[in-house]
Image (cartoon, rainbow, N blue to C red):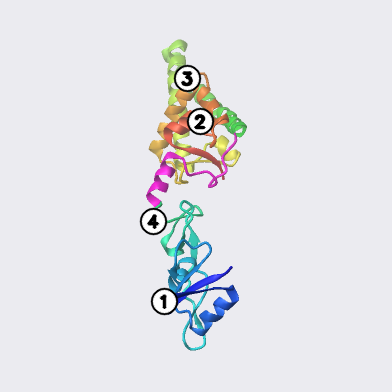
């Protein structure tokens, strides 16, 4: 690619890459020399070009070179070059200071997570739900047996059935909240190497886990449509995932 540079108030070029680097080595092109090549939006001091792109070296004046080039990268959002120290890292994506506020807002809204995670497919989520159901049924069966032996004869079978149904809902809610808040998963999801996180990858708090589980009752109450949404959602999110601001990913 050909270079142009400013000298004595005029423009010199085009010169080849090898010729240009020879001029740099000789000191004829200094850090203050204005240069341009195809791809640059405007003329820029060669020293600024080196620092911004990390490409090239500058002469020390003693027959050697000084590496003013700093490690750089491209902002994922605006696609401009910046020194690496000026870029924030979001799970491998480099974001400049100007784009950072907008990108963070995208993360909160779940709009910038594509490519960061591997989302769990709909049928894998169905299988995890079945495993969770089996686990919960075992726990509730053991609890019901214990309650039947201890207080069943005291309050009668009809009252016991109502109490057990209500307590069973509370136990299920408590178990799911504990597992998600503590381990970011449920027994069924853990068995299939699945994890529940926020769209930016941060962990789910106990409060959010509780809200997600309460919202899941709504997904079931709508004839299961809240669950079915995951089959068509780009991030495989259910209705309660959307409400709680969570995603289910592969570990």
- Relative image position of residue 16 (x, y in whole percent): 59, 73
Of the 4 image quadrants, the one containing the C terminus is top right
Mark 1 residue element: loop
Residue at numbered disc 4: 97
Mark 1 Cα shell of 10 Å, populated few (<14), some (14-19), many (≥20): few
- Relative image position of residue 100 (x, y in whole percent): 40, 52
Residue at numbered disc 2: 238
- Choose the circle earlier in sequence order: 2 or 4: 4
Q: Measure the C-alpha gap from mark 3 to mark 2.
A: 13 Å
Q: Measure the C-alpha gap from mark 2 to mark 4.
A: 33 Å
The dot on residue 17 is none
Q: Residue at x 54, y 30 (%)?
A: 230
Residue 53 painted magenta: no
Mark 2 Cα shell of 10 Å, populated few (<14), some (14-19), many (≥20): many
- Choose the circle earlier in sequence order: 1 or 3: 1
Q: Residue at x 42, y 14 (%)?
A: 154
Q: Residue at x 56, y 30 (%)?
A: 232
Residue at numbered disc 3: 221
Q: Which residues are magenta?
A: 100-121
Q: Is residue 144 above or below residue 86?
A: above
- Choose the circle earlier in sequence order: 2 or 1: 1
Q: Measure the C-alpha gap from mark 1 to mark 4.
A: 36 Å
Mark 4 residue element: loop
Of marks 1 and 3, the one in the foreground: 1
Q: Is residue 175 visible?
A: no
Mark 3 residue element: helix
């Amino acid at each position: 690619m050909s270079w142009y540079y400013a000298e004595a108030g005029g423009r010199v070029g085009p010169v080849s890459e090898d010729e240009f680097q020879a001029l740099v080595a000789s000191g004829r092109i200094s850090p203050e020399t204005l240069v341009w090549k195809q791809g640059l939006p405007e003329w820029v001091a060669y020293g600024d070009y080196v620092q911004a792109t990390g490409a090239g070296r500058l002469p020390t004046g003693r027959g050697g070179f000084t590496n003013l080039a700093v490690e750089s990268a491209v902002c994922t959002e605006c696609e401009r070059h910046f020194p690496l120290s000026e870029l924030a890292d979001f799970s491998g994506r480099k974001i400049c200071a100007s784009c950072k506020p907008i990108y963070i807002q995208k993360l909160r809204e779940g709009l910038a997570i594509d490519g960061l995670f591997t989302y769990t497919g709909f049928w894998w989520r169905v299988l995890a739900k079945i495993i969770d159901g089996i686990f919960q049924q075992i726990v509730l069966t053991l609890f019901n047996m214990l309650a039947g032996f201890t207080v069943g004869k005291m309050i009668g079978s009809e009252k016991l059935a109502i109490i057990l149904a209500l307590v069973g809902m509370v136990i299920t809610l408590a178990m799911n909240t504990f597992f998600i808040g503590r381990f970011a998963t449920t027994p069924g999801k853990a068995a299939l190497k699945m994890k529940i996180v926020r769209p930016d990858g941060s962990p789910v708090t106990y409060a959010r886990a509780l809200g997600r589980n309460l919202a899941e009752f709504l997904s079931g109450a709508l004839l299961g449509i809240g669950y079915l949404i995951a089959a068509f959602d780009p991030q495989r999110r259910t209705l309660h995932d959307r409400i709680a601001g969570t995603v289910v990913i592969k570990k």
